[in-house]
Amino acid sequence: MYMYMYMQMMMNLMVILVMYLVGNMIFVSKHKHLLIVLLSLEFIVLSIFFLMMMYLMMINNNMYMLMVFMVFSVCEGALGLSILVSMIRTHGNDYFFSYNLI
């Protein structure tokens, strides 16, 4: 019984690690569009959320910290979308190479 639970927990940790690595790989490689970058950041936040949830469940702690984390991640997502909308309104697209950052 305990061996099955241990194997299940290790499988979940491996899936979370793969999620995190894929999100980072997309973030590094797909830097052409701002929307893809924002989606990869949200994917990374989701994998960190799952990791925190598994850790807090493993130590039998309350899930209050997850609510705080979710509030900050929602605020981060809303800020990213507002920046995306303002860039599209001013420049007409979300390509990074068309912006003059200087």
Image (cartoon, rainbow, N blue to C red):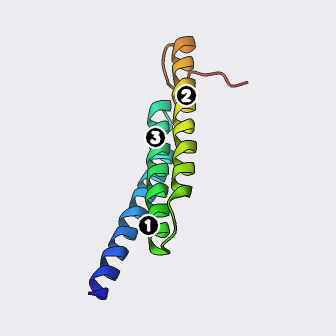
50 or 97: nearer the viewer: 50
Q: Is residue 46 visible?
A: yes
Q: Is residue 33 visible?
A: no
**Dot label at residue 96:** 2
- Residue at 66% in and 21% down: 100
Q: Is residue 92 above or below residue 18?
A: above
Residue type for callout 1: Met
Residue that numbered label 1 is attached to: 54
Q: What percent of the width, then of the height, locates residue 99?
A: 60, 22
What is the crowding at mark 3: few (fewer than 14 residues within 10 Å), some, or many (at least 20)?
few
What is the crowding at mark 2: few (fewer than 14 residues within 10 Å), some, or many (at least 20)?
few
Q: What percent of the width, then of the height, locates residue 46?
A: 44, 51
Give the foreground label among 2 and 1.
1
Instruction: Report which quarter residue 83 is drawn in.
Output: top right
Give the foreground label among 3 and 1.
1
Residue type for callout 2: Phe
Q: Secondary structure at mark 3?
A: loop
Q: What percent of the width, then of the height, locates residue 80?
A: 55, 32
Could you give the CA–CA distance between mark 2 and mark 1, rounded to whole angstroms? 36 Å
Q: Earlier in the sequence, mark 2 or mark 1?
A: 1
29 or 56: nearer the viewer: 56
Q: Secondary structure at mark 1?
A: helix
Q: Secondary structure at mark 2?
A: loop
Residue that numbered label 3 is attached to: 30
Could you give the CA–CA distance between mark 3 and mark 1, rounded to whole angstroms? 29 Å
Q: Is residue 93 above or below residue 70?
A: above
Q: Earlier in the sequence, mark 3 or mark 1?
A: 3
